[in-house]
């Protein structure tokens, strides 16, 4: 069993993606997590979750080196520089893109080593382990420095410039040297096993691989050029936008919550979940943030995804789906895996897909409202879908649910959930009026007013003058910071100002300057063991709320503190351990990145003259 110190901190990793597959590359040049051909496929390199049996692909100098890394220009192409006593080389990592999205995806992971100066001797290790590390694959030499990697229902084709040799029965290795101006390339392509003998993919030569690298750079630069955001926070905002784009599954328009599964919310803990799926709420938030800074096409794709996945029926809509629209996401544990730094269990699938969460109705209607305000009103088919959605919210708002945080304890009457039902009614009524669509206006108005009255009485602590987490409790919840962004209440309403102040007082984690999402062990029981770190999105929600209340100096302080938890590449995790200063939870976390964008936009709009 390896020492847990073998595992790099989560902040050591960089994300690469082609909007189909994803991989995490460590600071030392090792791919320790890779899922192909989809973001939720079984891992083919996965030592992030088991250092001994998970598999990896590493390229590193033979001698000690200094390492520097960055993304190239405005592209999701990672550059890692190795400086040794004898020279310098750079490693470029990406999934190759097709210019303009033409044709099928290549499903190709490309690694290019380029000499910068002097001479650098390097070692390449390819240790594929399919099906989340359970299968040591059959490695077969084909021809022309091409190897096939086969196991179960997965296969890889590995080729390139290095003279690879088998190491043992299941690994490949090579040693090579680069000098200034020289390039050495490695291609890893995901294929179906049955295709290898019948119709094996062509092996691209060196010139073609170089062209694919340039094509990938140009693809990302063109995408980035659509962004519209200026100011001192612009570099970080664009990096967050790129992270969200990287989590998008191109064929459907779905956006995954994160690229990983089972990275723990506390060191060695059991709060470990699979986030490689598309939550309606998180995705709707993402579309709002991306559209605000110029990336509107993604919102169009996600709207179609939701309509298709729900089969056009609001009553069949789930809170989350597989990125291909799958409805069944059974949660299983992989007991043979050690887990990141010993954090068990490792989970695949997510039982929350079966939960009842009321806020999803409001998020989808609100998304349609924002889209309408950008000039794209719902057509006849989508209006019928929205009509049923609003009716469902009107019928079910009195039921308890699991809430935004997907509590695994007993269902409760969460204030945020009720408020989002109000949003569904309110925005449905506005759409009906502005788009001249027929709707049961009087019934909707009556229900909308009833929801507000209930929330303002049962979800409000008169003594302190603040909103609370759920009916029947006096505890607070950072989700209340979202009430004004959903237009349930104005940012500068005295009740909201007091609620924000109370959240600062009660949910700050010591003097860290960062918020917990709620106090575990108090108020509503979440049904889980152990503690967790601060939830980074909540601090960005607070920064947005304070900025829009005109408290810009306070907002900037919170924003900068939350931003400081990102790594050197501007990537954020889900949570953060304020004692150790290390990232926690799945990574990169879409909810954190989209909240970072929203807070930066709020600050830019309320900064005032300098």
Image (cartoon, grey):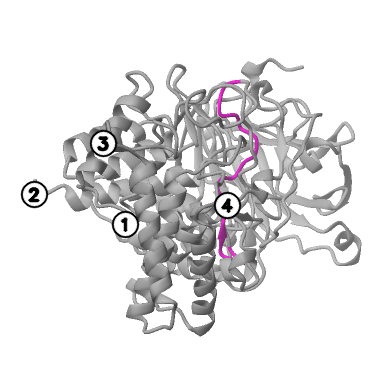
Which of marks 1 and 3 precedes in the sequence? 3
Say if 489 sits above or below 560 in the image.
Answer: below
Pointers 2 and 1 in contact (C-beta within 8 Å)? no
Q: Which mark is residue 609?
A: 2
* Residue 200 belongs to the span the image colors magenta: no
* Distance of label 4 from label 1 (alpha carbons): 26 Å
For discs 2 and 1, the disc positioned in front in the rendered view: 1
Residue 280, how many percent across, how many down? 54, 56
Foreground pick, 174 / 506: 506
Above or below, 45 relative to 37: above
Q: Which residue is mark 1?
A: 487
- 318 vs 334, nearest the viewer: 318
Q: Residues within 10 Å of mark 1 (few under 14, many from 20)?
A: some
Q: How many marks?
A: 4
Residue highlighted by disc 3: 465
Q: For the residue labelled by badge 4, is the local secondary structure a helix, a strand or a loop?
A: loop
């Amino acid at each position: 069993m390896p020492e847990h110190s073998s595992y790099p901190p989560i902040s050591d990793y960089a994300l690469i993606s082609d909007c189909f597959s994803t991989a995490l590359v460590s600071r030392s040049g090792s791919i320790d997590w890779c899922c192909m051909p989809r973001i939720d496929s079984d891992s083919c390199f996965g030592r992030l979750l088991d250092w001994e049996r998970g598999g990896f692909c590493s390229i590193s100098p033979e001698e000690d080196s200094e390492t520097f890394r960055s993304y190239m220009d405005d592209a999701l192409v990672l550059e890692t520089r190795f400086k040794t006593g004898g020279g310098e080389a750079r490693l470029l990592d990406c999934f190759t893109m097709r210019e303009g999205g033409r044709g099928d995806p290549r499903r190709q992971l490309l690694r290019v080593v380029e000499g910068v100066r002097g001479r650098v001797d390097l070692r390449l290790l390819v240790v594929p382990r399919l099906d989340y590390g359970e299968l040591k694959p059959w490695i077969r030499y084909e021809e022309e420095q091409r190897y096939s990697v086969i196991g179960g229902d997965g296969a890889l084709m590995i080729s390139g410039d290095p003279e690879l040799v088998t190491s043992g029965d299941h690994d490949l290795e090579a040693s090579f040297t680069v000098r200034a101006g020289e390039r050495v390339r490695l291609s890893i392509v995901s294929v179906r096993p049955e295709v290898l003998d019948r119709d094996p993919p062509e092996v691209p030569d060196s010139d073609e691989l170089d062209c694919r690298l340039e094509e990938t750079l140009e693809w990302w630069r063109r995408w980035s050029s659509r962004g519209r955001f200026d100011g001192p926070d612009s570099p970080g905002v664009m990096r967050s936008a790129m992270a969200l784009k990287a989590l998008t599954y191109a064929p459907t328009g779905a956006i995954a919550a994160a690229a990983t599964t089972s990275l723990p919310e506390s060191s060695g803990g059991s709060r470990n979940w699979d986030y490689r799926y598309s939550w309606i709420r998180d995705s709707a938030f993402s579309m709002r943030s991306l559209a605000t800074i110029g990336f509107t096409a993604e919102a169009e794709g996600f709207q179609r995804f939701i309509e298709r996945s729900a089969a056009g029926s609001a009553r069949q809509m789930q809170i989350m789906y597989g990125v291909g629209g799958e409805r069944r996401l059974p949660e299983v544990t992989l007991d043979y895996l050690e887990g990141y730094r010993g954090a068990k269990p490792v989970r695949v699938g997510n039982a929350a897909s079966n939960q009842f969460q009321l806020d999803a109705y409001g998020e989808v209607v609100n998304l349609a409202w924002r889209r309408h305000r950008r000039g794209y009103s719902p057509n006849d088919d989508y209006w019928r879908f929205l009509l049923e959605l609003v009716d469902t919210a009107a019928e079910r708002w009195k039921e308890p649910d699991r809430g935004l945080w997907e509590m695994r304890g007993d269902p409760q009457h969460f204030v945020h959930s009720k408020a989002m039902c109000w949003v569904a009614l309110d925005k449905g009524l506005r759409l009906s009026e502005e788009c001249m669509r027929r709707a049961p206006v009087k019934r909707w108005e009556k229900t909308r007013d009833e929801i507000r009255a209930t929330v303002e009485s049962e979800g409000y602590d008169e003594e302190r003058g603040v909103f609370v987490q759920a009916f029947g409790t006096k505890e607070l919840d950072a989700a209340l910071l979202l009430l004004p962004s959903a237009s349930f209440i104005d940012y500068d309403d005295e009740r909201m100002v007091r609620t924000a102040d109370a959240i600062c007082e009660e949910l700050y984690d010591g003097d860290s300057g960062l918020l917990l999402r709620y106090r575990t062990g108090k108020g509503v029981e979440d049904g889980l063991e152990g503690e967790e770190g601060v939830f980074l999105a909540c601090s960005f929600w607070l920064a947005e709320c304070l900025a829009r209340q005109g408290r810009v100096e306070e907002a900037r302080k919170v924003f900068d503190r939350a931003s400081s938890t990102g790594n050197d590449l501007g990537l954020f995790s889900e949570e953060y351990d304020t004692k150790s200063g290390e990232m926690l939870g799945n990574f990169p976390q879409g909810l954190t990145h989209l909240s970072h964008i929203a807070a930066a936009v709020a600050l830019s709009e309320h900064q005032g003259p300098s």
